[in-house]
Amino acid sequence: MDTNLHSLDRRLIELSIAHADLDALIDRAALLTPLDELLVRRLKKRRLLLKDDIARVQRLLTPNEPA
């Protein structure tokens, strides 16, 4: 069980880093002239998927029952 939790913790960290990297990439892409709207839209969609994955892993790590 500990290895499973460790794996989930590690996955959460990896997803959070990827989400932060996408944030930075979206910010840089928004500064480009001309703005590549398709690229920005795709990056934002990927960022949203990562956010959903982060929420899913957090739910797995957090017990539903009150302590």
Image (cartoon, grey):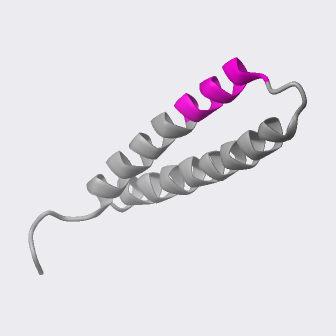
> On the rendered image, what quadrant is the N terminus found in?
bottom left
Residue 46, x across and y down, in percent:
56, 31
- Front residue of 24 and 6: 24
Q: At 53% across and 29% down in the image, what residue appears?
A: 45
Q: Is residue 19 above or below residue 63?
A: above
Front-lying residue, 46 or 60: 46
Query: Would you identify the image quadrant in which residue 59 lies?
Result: bottom left
**Does residue 39 show up magenta in the picture?**
yes
Q: Nearer the viewer, residue 57 or 9?
A: 57
Is residue 36 shown above or below 19? above
Q: Quadrant of the C terminus?
A: bottom left
Q: Residue furthest right?
A: 33
Q: Is residue 27 magenta?
A: no
Q: At x 82% / y 43%, what residue is drawn?
A: 28
Looking at the image, residue 14 lies above or below residue 25 = below
Tell me the magenta residue range. 36-46
- Taking the image as shown, residue 1 lies to the left or right of residue 63, namely right
Most common secondary structure along the magenta stretch: helix
Q: Residue 52: percent from the left, percent from the top?
A: 40, 42
- Residue 38 x, y percent position in the rendering: 68, 18
Count the marks. 0
The residue located at (59%, 50%) in the rendering is 14
Q: Position of residue 64 (x, y in %)?
A: 13, 63
Of all residues, the one furthest to the top in this rendering is 38
- Indicate left or right for 3 with 29 as reference: left
Residue furthest toward the front? 34
